[in-house]
Image (cartoon, coloured by chain):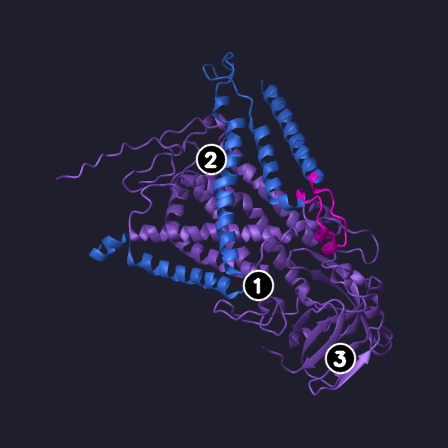
Chain colours: A blue, B purple
Amino acid sequence: MSRVGRFYGAQPLHLLASVVSFAIVAGGVAGWFQAGSDPLAIVIWALGATFVFEWILLPLVWALDQIAFGPQWRRAPAGPAAPDRPGAPPPRANRAYVRVPALLSVLLLIVFAPLIFSADRPEFEATTGIVAPDYLARWLLATAAMFVVSAVSYALSLRRVRARK
Amino acid sequence: VSARVRPRAPRPSSWRSPLRGPWLTSALGVVLLAGLPLVFITGLLSNAAYNPWLNGNVALQGRARSPLDFYLFTWPAHPAWLYAVNQGIHVSLGLALIPAIVVKQWSVMPRFVARPTFRSPAHALERLSLVFLVGGTFFEIVTGLLFEEYWVPFHFDFTAAHYYGAWVFFGALLLHTALKLPKMRESLRTRGSLARVLRTDLEHTVPEPPEDPASTPDSLVPSAPTSPTMSRRALLGATAAGSALLGVQGVAQDIGGPVRSLAFLLPRGSDAGTGPNDFPVNGTYASIGLPLDTILKWRLRISGPDGSSLEFTRGELRSRFPQHTYRLPLSCREGWSTTQPWRGVRLADLAAAVGVHGSPAVYVEALDGGTATLAANQVSAEQSLLALDVNGVPISLDHGYPARVIVPDEIAVNCLKWVSSMTFAPVIDT
C-alpha cells in the first residue's frame, strides 16, 4: 500500500465508495433543508429517533429481558441425570415459551404505541370517520393469545418428550 | 523525558451473549439486504405515482426541486392494481423488517462503543457513515409509523422528510453494503449454516469460533461468553414471528375485504359497517368544515385552454353524459386499499365537452382547497371517472359527494373528493 494508502487506512476504492455514498447522503440532508419546514426539527427527530431507540428502548428491553430470563436461571434445580443420557444435566424448563411471547408483546406495544395509548384522539375520528377501537384491549388480547399459543405448544412438546420415553 | 504511558489492560468485555458473532449478524444482514432495497424502491415509485412535477400535486408542493427529485417516467394508468401492490409491499415489508433491524442492531451493539473510536481516516468515515445509516433507518421507521397511526407530533412535512430521509439512509446503505459484503459472504460460508442452526437446541448452542484478533480487533464473538439462555434458532424464530405479526397487518389492510380485520392494530383494520359507502375514508366531510349550503348549490365547472367553460349539476352530469361503471381500487399511500364499483362520467368525455380532443391533462380543484393535476395518460384512460355513485348509490359526503375523481392505478391523494372545477389543457407542467 502506498504511503497515502497507509495513512488513509484502506484501498483507494474505499475512498471512492465513500465519496459516492456521502454525496447521496448529503443530497438527502440538503433535501431536508430545502424542504422548508423547519429542517432543525427533522435533524432533531433523526437523531432523537436513533437515540431513543438505541440507547433507551433497546437497552431497557434487554435489561428487562435479562432480569426476567437471564443467566441466573442457569442454575436449574439439581435433579437426577436424564436417564437417556447418563451424566448430562437434567433438561431445563425451556423459558423460550414465556420469553418469546413476552418479547413479541413488547414489540407490538412499541410499534403500535401511538394507537394503543390514544385514549382521546379526535383526529383519528376526523380522518377515518369511525370511532377509534380500543387498541389497548386489542393489544392485551393479542398478548393473551400469544401466551395461549405458546402454552399449547409447550404442552405438545412435553407430550412428545413423554411419548419418546 | 519519556512520557509514562500506562498500558491499559484489556477489559473483559461486558458484551457476553454467546449468540453474538459474524454468522448471526450476517444471516440477519442477508434478510435486510434483500428487503431494504425493495422498501426503498417501492418508496421511490410511490413518490413517482404523485406525478410530482405536475402543478398542484402534493409531493413537491411549494418546494424547490433538488437533484434527487428526478422522474424518469409518467406514472402509468394500467394495471389498475399496480399502486396498491407497490404500496402494500412498501408498508408491509417496512413493518416486517423492523424486528430484523432491531435484532441486527442488538447483534452489533458492542461495535457502537468499540475503542479506539477510529483507527484511521477510512475507519472514521465508516463510523460517520453508520451514524447516517442508523439515523436514516430509524427516522424512516419512526416517521412512517407515526404517519401510519395518525399521530404526527413533528412539525415538518412528512412526504418530503420521509422522501429525503430515504436517500440519507440509502446513500449510507450503499457504502455499508460495499464494505461488508465480502465479510458477510465469508461468514455465511465458513462459520455455520442455517440448516445446522435450525437443528441446534439450547443445550447444544455454543459460541461462534473466535476470530483472529490481528485481522479483527473488534470481533463480535464474546471473549468471555455466558452460557446461552436461548438457542439461535429460537432467536431467529422469534424474529420471524415478529416479522409475520407486523407484516400481516400491512398485507391485510391492503387486500381488504374479508381479511381486513387481520390488521387489528392498524387504523384500516376496522370497517365502518356494511352499507354501500362503508369502506375506508381518509379525511371526513366533517373535518374540512364545509357548509352544507356549498354542497347544495354545487355545480361542476369545466374549462378548456381557451377559457371557455361549462357548468353542470349532478343531474345534468347524469343525463348529458354516458355513465360507466368500473371496479377500481382506491389505494392510499398509507398502504391500505379498497376496491369498489364506481359509476360516473369518463374524464375523456368531459374534456371533449369543452372541445379538448386528443390527450389533454387536467388541473382539478376541490371545495376543500385540494388541487391535483392528472397527466394525459390518466385523463385518456378508459376507466378514469368523475364518480357520482358507488355500489349503486350516490357517493357519501365523506367519500366526496357531489363528485370525486377515481383514476386507475393512481395514488388516492391525487383522486380529489368534492371536485369543484376541472381545467383541461394539452400540456400542464410547472
Horizontal and vertical percent position of residue B215: 29, 42
Q: Could you say whether the residue bearing mark 3 is in a helix, strand or loop?
A: strand
Residue at 61% x, 47% y is B247
Question: Does the CB distance between marks 2 and 1 fall below 8 Å?
Answer: no
Amino acid residing under circle 2: Arg
Task: Based on the picture, tell me whether residue A132 belongs to the magenta stretch.
Answer: yes
Calculate the distance from the C-alpha at mark 1 to the C-alpha at mark 3: 31 Å
Q: Quadrant of the C terminus of chain B?
A: bottom right
Q: Chain of mark 3?
A: B
Instruction: Name the image quarter holding the N terminus of chain B.
Output: top left
Quick check: do tags 3 and 2 share a chain?
A: yes
Along the line of sight, which residue is nearer the eye, B239 or B63? Answer: B63
Q: Is residue A34 left or right of residue A140?
A: left
Q: Earlier in the sequence, mark 3 or mark 2?
A: 2
Disc 1 on helix, strand or loop?
helix
Check disc 2: other Cα within 10 Å, few if <14, some if 14-19, many if 20+: few
Of mark 2 and mark 1, the one earlier in the sequence is 1
Measure the alpha-carbon separation of dots 2 and 1.
Answer: 39 Å
Q: Residue furthest left?
A: B1
Q: Which residues are magenta?
A: A116-136
Disc 2 target residue: B196
The quarter of the picture where residue B84 lies is bottom right
Name the residue tied to disc 3.
B302
* Chain containing the residue with disc 1: B
- How far across and how far down the image is residue B426, in percent? 65, 83
Q: Residue at x 71, y 86 (%)?
A: B307
Q: Mark 1 or 3 closer to N-term?
A: 1
Determine which residue is flagged by label 1.
B45
